Amino acid sequence: MAELKPQSLMDVYEQALAHDPALAAALSANQAAQELIEQGKALYRPVVNFNAGVNASRTEIAFNNLASPFKGGVQTFEGYNYGVEARQPIFRKENLVQMGQAQTQVSQADKQLNLSQQDLIVRTTQTYFDVLIAQDKIDLINAQKAAILSQLDQAKANFDAGLSTITDVNEAQARYDLIVAQAMAAINGLQIAERALQAITGAIPQRLAMVKTDLKPHSLEQGMEKWLAVAVQNNLNLQIHQDTVTYSEQEIDRAKAGHLPTVDAVASYNDTYTNGGQFGFGNDLKNGTIGLQLQIPLYQGGATSSRVRQAILNKQKALDDVALARRQTELETQRAYLNLNTSIAQVNAYEQAVTSSQSQVASTRKGYDVGIRTSIDVLNAQQQLFAAKRDLLQARYDYLVNIIRLKAAAGVVTETDLADINQQLVR
């Protein structure tokens, strides 16, 4: 049976594009928002209504002290009517503003969809490497468990031969029992990480491509101030809040339009028929009209002025939200920049730490063999080596994730960046 080919970061991302419910919801919301444009255009298109009715009437009339040619008493008759009315707005400032608001809302929806796509890139990258570090922890713990078990067997043999004390055996046994407990926790951590990735892709990953062991981090070419300038210009969350300011300004104009007159062109046709009436005869009336209708608002109880004041206050809130979003964007960019710089330095430092720890383990073993080092010294050196290896792997993953996080904070992360990270994996 052929060995299962490991999934790369791009493979997992393709799955996420097809199955992530958050992105699917954002796409549906965006498609729904596109309809606002058509609804805005409809505000300045003709409105045509058809109406019809049928009725039956019963009346009773009596003429008092009056000679009348009409017959009194009870009359019953039926009738029907139908008509068509067409209304074409000529001037409605409120409708014009609403058309502009629809475009602003669609602009926000487009940015929100792009933001969801960027968020998916970040979430996929983070969860991918969360699974990798969880797998690495299990591998390192198993290797450490094998080393401790070997040391335990050697301590028991030396104790049986009278070459060491029971303390060495007990120390090795305690370390072994502890590493067994840590192995169970690591397995649980892997299952949690896999379920987190499943929530995005819809499937538990079987095997993931590992990061190249010769990964060399690249120092940042641009300083923090440059990244901050890029973030202020391109961060989508900040742009969405800026669109909210635009929308609130339009809302002020729409509220003020409540003071302005409206002009409509109106055309109608009505046909009314009855076969009788209270005076004994019916009628068949056909009527068609066409003209202009002017409506001037004089007083509406102060509601229009109140809506204007409300819109002005909402604009101030939107401006405050922009200021808050700008500060959050700058903070996130600074944090991502510093984290990336730190992870670059950590990779280099932990690589040296692994080399030093390997030398320490070798020298400690030699000292133990000649009797100048104890079993505890060997166990401590081994533990330090495995901790350095774990920290090196974590630093490499953090480095790759922080690249994506910095570009996401600046609003410039794309699938190309994900493909660049994918090049650092071993297929």
Image (tube, rainbow, N blue to C red):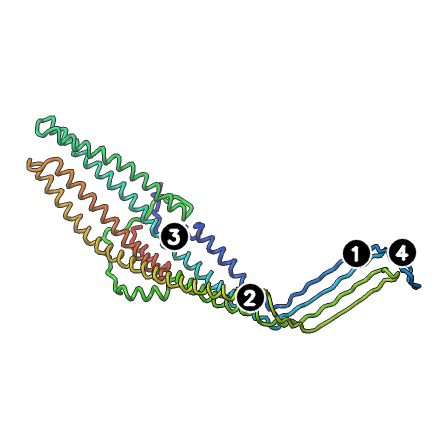
User: How far separated are the C-alphas under marks 2 and 1?
Assistant: 40 Å
The amino acid sitting under disc 1 is Asn
In the image, is residue 340 above or below residue 94? above
Q: Are marks 3 and 4 in contact (CB under 8 Å)?
A: no
Residue nearer the viewer, 299 or 28: 299
Alpha-carbon distance for marks 2 and 4?
53 Å
Task: List the residue tagged with mark 2.
Answer: 304
Mark 1 or mark 2, which is nearer the start of the sequence?
A: 1
Looking at numbered disc 4 in the image, what kind of residue is underneath it?
Gly
Residue ID for mark 3: 13
Q: Residue beneath label 4, please?
A: 73
For disc 1, the neighbor class at 10 Å (few under 14, some 14 to 19, many from 20) is few
Query: Going from the N terminus, do you reach mark 1 or mark 4 first?
Result: 1
Real-space Cα distance between discs 1 and 4? Answer: 20 Å
* 3 vs 2, front mark: 2
Residue 352 percent across, percent down from the top left: 16, 51
The label nearer to you, 1 versus 4, is 4
